[in-house]
Amino acid sequence: MQDFGEAFRLAFGLVLSADADLIEIIALSLRVSLTAVAIACAAGLPIGAAVAMARFRGRTATIILLNALMGLPPVVIGLLVYLLLSNAGPLGWLQLLYTPAAMITAQAILITPIVAALSREVVEQLHNEYAEQFRSLCVPTLTAVGTLLWDARYSLITVALAGFGRAVAEVGAVIIVGGNIAHLTRVMTTAIALETSKGDLELALALGIVLITLALTVNAAVMALRLTATRYAYA
Amino acid sequence: MLDLVATAKRAEQAESAGISVLPGEARGLVYRVADRTLIDGIDLTLCGGTVTVVMGPNGAGKSLLLRLLHGMLTPTEGKVLWCGEPLTGALRLRQAMVFQRPVLLRRSVAANIRFVLKLRGDGARKRTDEILEEAGLAMQAGQPARLLSGGEQQRLSLARALALEPQVLFLDEPTTSLDPAATAAIEAIVTRAHRRGTKIVFVTHDLGQARRLADEVVFLDQGRIAEHTPASRFFANPASEAARDYLAGRLVLQ
């Protein structure tokens, strides 16, 4: 039990002293997950908006598929991206396996359906409200899409934050395609897994503390956004 | 496609020559949903310069008629013509509609006006200020539109429709949930627009409002026009039984 308390003391020490290894790992985590979120939004928001506004055959099936893909198991995505990027795979020539780019790819694939499915819901709700007025005003389709995305921006930012939360906390995909290589592809979650299995609890705990703080911050940001949006009746 | 281009061109020419898109005509208009005939063979001509009030019991097809005339719905049979042309986007640009429940963008009051001005290629701040001034909303310009009171929201919705300088303005029971003061404000704006030459097509349940506004009344009953007469004759001496019952305050059951 003394070890346990000692581990916590050392962990806080690492966080407070801004340990170089710790900072490097956090920075890479943020870089990988934020880039993945940016890519997922670039792909997922237009998909979500298109499915929300368009009426086509198989639309319900598409929505079911998007919703189902939200629950993709990270290890399976990791495995698929690994197969694609390994030397024998179709994209092996890119030589991306065990690089941050591979981790970004895996996380982007993991959270694009989340962004698409959640933004579909948000945009569709607003579209139902605006549609008749827009028809009356003869609003061109592209202007309508832009208006819906802008007017739904508060809700859409929370969608992006949900995607970020999922990306930064997942371990299964990045450990397979990144390999947890020190100073190269070691992120918070993979480091925690490794250090714990090595018995080096203080670094694992320090990273755990940072990860939990990050999760709390993201959730607080979501809450603050919702409150602001409600206050201005923009939600 | 060629037709569309030609129609758009004619509409543009009409616009540039200051020619009205009126008269509006409905010819043999039928609208069915599943097996129910909701609009049942309506022939109607709407001329410029008048306020046409559409009345009738619930379910008579008033809102549907408005939507068909404005091209929001496609009729099952028959056609809608404006200035002798089928209704296209180019012609609908010369019309505007105010709905029973105002649909306001989640933006500020001024941004709601700017949105439609920009759609028509006119984003001038000065115009926005003038429009808000006229609607009595200048003080609220920076406020979120959806935090306005019900009456103010409908005034904004009406101001936004008029910002398009439409030749025809459709109003679908715009004052149903408003108090007398807010109703009076809406009526005043509609009357001013009418004086400036906008054709008004106003759906209402409110007999007092119909008396105040109407030049002519279209009375609908079960998807058909029971009568279409000048307002003075309608209120003094309604020709149809349905209208007589309605005016007498008797329950008109479908």
Image (cartoon, rainbow, N blue to C red):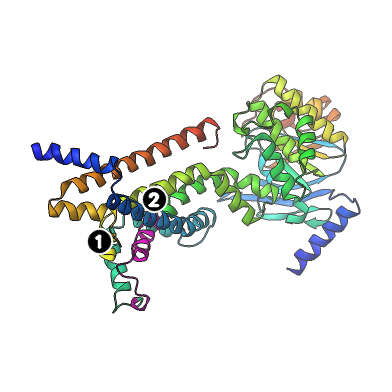
Tag 2 secondary structure: helix
Query: Can you say whether A57 is above or below B157 in the image?
Result: below
- B129 vs A172, left or right, is right
Write down the region rendered in magenta. Answer: A92-114
Q: Position of residue B215 (x, y in %)?
A: 85, 33
Instruction: Identify the amino acid type marked 2.
Output: Gly
Residue A78 seen from this side: yes
Residue B218 or residue B23, whichever sits in front: B23
Residue A96 is one of the magenta-drawn residues: yes
User: In which quadrant is the N terminus of chain A drawn?
Assistant: top left
Q: Position of residue A191 (x, y in %)?
A: 23, 54
Query: Can you say whether A175 is above or below A92 in the image?
Result: above
Q: Classify residue B238 by image quadrant.
A: top right
Q: Which mark is residue A180?
A: 1
Dot 1 surroundings within 10 Å: few (below 14), some, or many (20 or more)? Answer: many
Q: Nearer the viewer, mark 1 or mark 2?
A: 1
Instruction: Identify the amino acid type marked 1.
Output: Asn
- A64 vs B27, left or right, is left
Residue B198 is one of the magenta-drawn residues: no
Q: Which residue is mark 2?
A: A163
State whether discs 1 and 2 lie on one chain.
yes
Q: Position of residue A139 (x, y in %)?
A: 67, 51
Cα distance in 3D space between marks 1 and 2: 22 Å
Q: Classify residue A12 by image quadrant.
A: top left
